[in-house]
Image: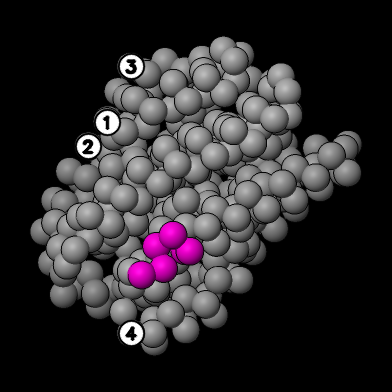
Amino acid sequence: MPLITVFSDALAWLGRRSARAVALSMVLALAIPPLGPLAKQAMVPLILALLILSFVRTDIRSAFGGGRAAVAVAAVAWIILALPGVLGLVTAQLGEPGALTLAVLMQACAPPVMSAPAFALLLGLDARLVLAVMVGAMAAVPFTAPALIAHFSHGALALDPLALGLRLAAVVGGTALAGTVLRRAAGPARIARWSTHLDGVNVLLLGGMAFGLLDGVTFAFIDQPLFMARLVALACALSVVGIGATMLVFRTIDPGDALTLGFASGHRNMSVMIAATGAVLPPETWLYVGAAQFPIYLLPMLLRPVARRLRRTPA
């Protein structure tokens, strides 16, 4: 059997088990910590590849059809203004911001994770709306995040809006262009036929990111098990609250779209915020970034039955 056939069959097999495979990749990342530093060096290419693949598989022009434009604008405002404002008011009651408060504020003010469309596709849901919301949030975050974080952190943490804006513009613009060119070259029909194989590619890319994002987390669990357990519990609680609140607010739209918006709202891209700060953060903030990966990688497996039921629910 030709090697290319074996590889193709392996990708399809992996794609059919995508949610479980993504969760397993996080377990492997924790079990094999020496691979973390190597994967960390490949984080940028992995993120770019995930975004390009999302644009390849999604017709972004149709994302604003069928009444989605108004929903996308409302979702962007909810994700980058309303939720951060509510969480900021809650943290303000805790007194002067500490390292964990800063981490939570950064998470709340960040745009959705760049893998949100990939997770939507892995769950068998329509990725068009969440891709449009992710792009819109990235365009608006340089204007909203610096002001919100400076206000609620009492000036303890400052972001460079110009650096953040240029970085996000380069990422989104470059990947959108590459994805659109590849989509036109392959054609929608061929992409649809390769759907399962592309799910397998998504799994490999997300797995590689897991190794990089969880670098150092294993040793932190060994050194400070109770502290890390509390961080993971906090990250999971915030994710679940974000998903639930968003699905409640957008309960009148298509149920699958509401779930994907919930996933985007509950899981934020803290890496771009870290880059905008110049990566000068307290150690506890870095550990929280690793803890925040647990709900991102584990919840899709738990949400798979929900997504399956929603796909059968008429809009």
Mark 2, other Cα within 10 Å: few <14 / some 14–19 / many ≥20: few
Residue at the image point whose x is 47% and y is 18% from the top: 159
Residue 169 tag number: 1
Mark 1, other Cα within 10 Å: few <14 / some 14–19 / many ≥20: some
> What residue range appears in magenta?
247-252
Label whose residue precedes the other's in the sequence (4 or 2): 2
Label whose residue precedes the other's in the sequence (1 or 3): 3
Residue 80 figure quarter: top left
Does residue 227 appear in this view? yes
Is there CB contact under 8 Å for labels 2 and 1?
Answer: yes
Residue at the image point whose x is 33% and y is 84% from the top: 314
> From the viewer's perspective, is residue 225 above or below residue 187?
above
Q: Position of residue 286 (x, y in %)?
A: 66, 30
Mark 4, other Cα within 10 Å: few <14 / some 14–19 / many ≥20: few
Cα separation between marks 2 and 3: 16 Å
The three-letter amino acid code for the residue at tag 4 is Pro
Residue at the image point whose x is 30% and y is 23% from the top: 166
Label whose residue precedes the other's in the sequence (2 or 3): 3
Task: Give the camera-side residue of 194 and 257.
Answer: 257
The three-letter amino acid code for the residue at tag 3 is Leu
Is there CB contact under 8 Å for labels 3 and 4?
Answer: no
Residue 314 tag number: 4
Residue at the image point whose x is 22% and y is 45% from the top: 176
Label whose residue precedes the other's in the sequence (3 or 4): 3
Residue 173 tag number: 2
Cα separation between marks 3 and 4: 43 Å
Q: Nearer the viewer, mark 1 or mark 4?
A: 4
Q: What is the secondary structure assignment of the residue under circle 2?
A: helix
Q: What is the secondary structure assignment of the residue under circle 1?
A: helix
